[in-house]
Amino acid sequence: MLPVSPGSRVHGWKRHAALAIVLATLSACASVPARQTLTPVDPNTLASSQTLNGAGGAWPDATWWQGFNDPQLDALETEALANSPDLLAAQARLEKAQAVDAQVKAAMDADLTLNASTSETKSSLNMGFPPQFQAFLPQGYWNHTRITLDANYDLDLWGKSHAALKAALGEAKAAELDQAAARSDLTVAVARAYVELNRLYDQRDALSDLKRGADIKLDLDQARFDHNVDPKDVLLAAQDDQQQIVGRLAQLDGMIRLQDDLIAALLGAGPDRALSLTRPQLAPADTQTLPDDVRLNLLARRPDVQAALQRVEAQGEGLTYAKADFYPNLKLNAYFGIEALSKGGVQNLFDSGSDIGGFGPALSLPLFHQGRLTAEYKGYEADYDAAVATYDKTLVDSLQQVADAAGKTQSTAAQAQAQQARIDNAQQGYDLSKARMASNLASKIDVLTAHARLIAALSAAADLKAESYADRISFLAALGGGYSQ
């Protein structure tokens, strides 16, 4: 057996110590937890082929409200798009998202900073220097000046910076889509308020006709009471009927004013703007049908669905961002400049030999951070799952809205057709009662009763007309409100 020198023992101990340190370091490194996140719903798995069956309809364009052929509505929509606080807020959110995107993009560039400092500095003489060296050490306060250009660049070995950039781009795109959705919501809200205003005016017309009949009936009952034909309770009942109609007319006038105020608020204007609104002049509402490619292109025409999908992708990049924190990070650092220590000024700062510099890599490795990094990663997983759940709900809701709008349009059209038959019958009964009265076969009371039935039928038809307008708006909104990528 060969003898082992003490030096060999020392070197062997150092190698074993170095290996132990490496192993301890590796065991202390954080390990990435297994990903456990939701999977977005595949639109193709949501059965809709029978419900969303194309029927040769057209996709709405960006100015779909012009199909109502009402110049005042066109002007209101234009004003709302220019001044609405909701749309201005959406624009501000978009600009903020774009600013964040620009910040992240700039952070990926090499960082270069000019640093300069000067101070009066006194160093301790009791730092373990031999007594014979103390005479060469600076005594008292000296001026210490340093001017450097410092640079660093992150090599982004694990794609953390690129993931942050993709996430910021996704959020900016989502904000842009939010703005498109806000635009659609605003135009829909203005159109619905305008249609409701039109319904109130139609209801007032019908009620005014009914009041004219009630006035005539009251005059007749008053005359019959004056001639002792009918008792006073008949007259009082007629007076009550008339006052009920008067009260309903006053209520409608108030509702019209409130609707005018609502439209003014949607425009981002004060209540005085409502005073200039006139009665709507809407063209008849056409029955809407689904486009042939509705199932193929619906999702691409819904900005809310696209925004939700963008946020899922952005949160997915957030997972990549968080995952990179588990791995070593490598940066390149460099500095170049001048530095000097002088007595009473900076006179030797620019002398030969004052230059300084350094260049090299910097490695950081997460040690004993498993709990914190895992918790952060789980937080990003929760954000991703929330984005997936929002997307799934938005997707399902969009399909439901189209199906509801298509079904409601057909239902209202069928009701309107049935109501027209009621109007025809009521009109015929009214005409017959007038003819009978002309032949002294019916009284004026009979004519007024038939007229009231006709007014009731016309009033119900006015409600269905307003409903058909609202159905048309809902239908166009469900198809994306004219948005296209």
Image: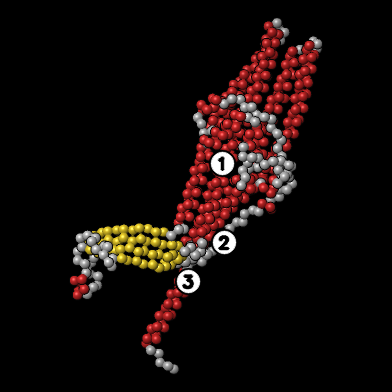
Badge 2, how many Cα within 10 Å: few under 14, some, many 20+?
few
Q: Quadrant of the N terminus?
A: bottom left
As shown in the figure, which amino acid type bears the numbered disc 2? Arg
Query: Height in image: 435 above or below 260?
Result: above
Residue at screen point 38% across, 89% down: 5
Answer with the quarter of the image where residue 238 lies: top right
Q: CA distance from mark 1 to mark 2?
A: 35 Å
* Residue type, label 3: Leu
* SS at badge 1: helix
The residue pinned by badge 2 equals 35
**Residue at position x 23%, y 65% from top?**
123
The residue that disc 1 covers is 182
Labels 1, 3: front one: 1
Left-right relation of 90 to 55: left
Image coordinates for residue 458, horizontal then vertical, percent:
71, 24
Count of marks placed on residues: 3
Mark 1–mark 3 distance (CA, rounded to whole Å): 51 Å
Q: Is residue 364 something that shows in the picture?
A: no
Q: Quadrant of residue 276?
A: top right
Q: Nearer the viewer, residue 408 or 141?
A: 141
Residue furthest to the bottom in view is 1
Residue 125: x and y in percent read: 22, 68
From this viewpoint, which residue is outermost toward the front? 352
Name the element at disc 3.
Answer: helix
Q: Which residue has dot 3 on it?
A: 26
Label 2 with label 3: CB-CB less than 8 Å? no
Q: In terms of sequence position, does the residue under pointer 2 or pointer 3 come before the other?
A: 3
Q: Which residue shows up at 67% across the image and 44% down it?
A: 400
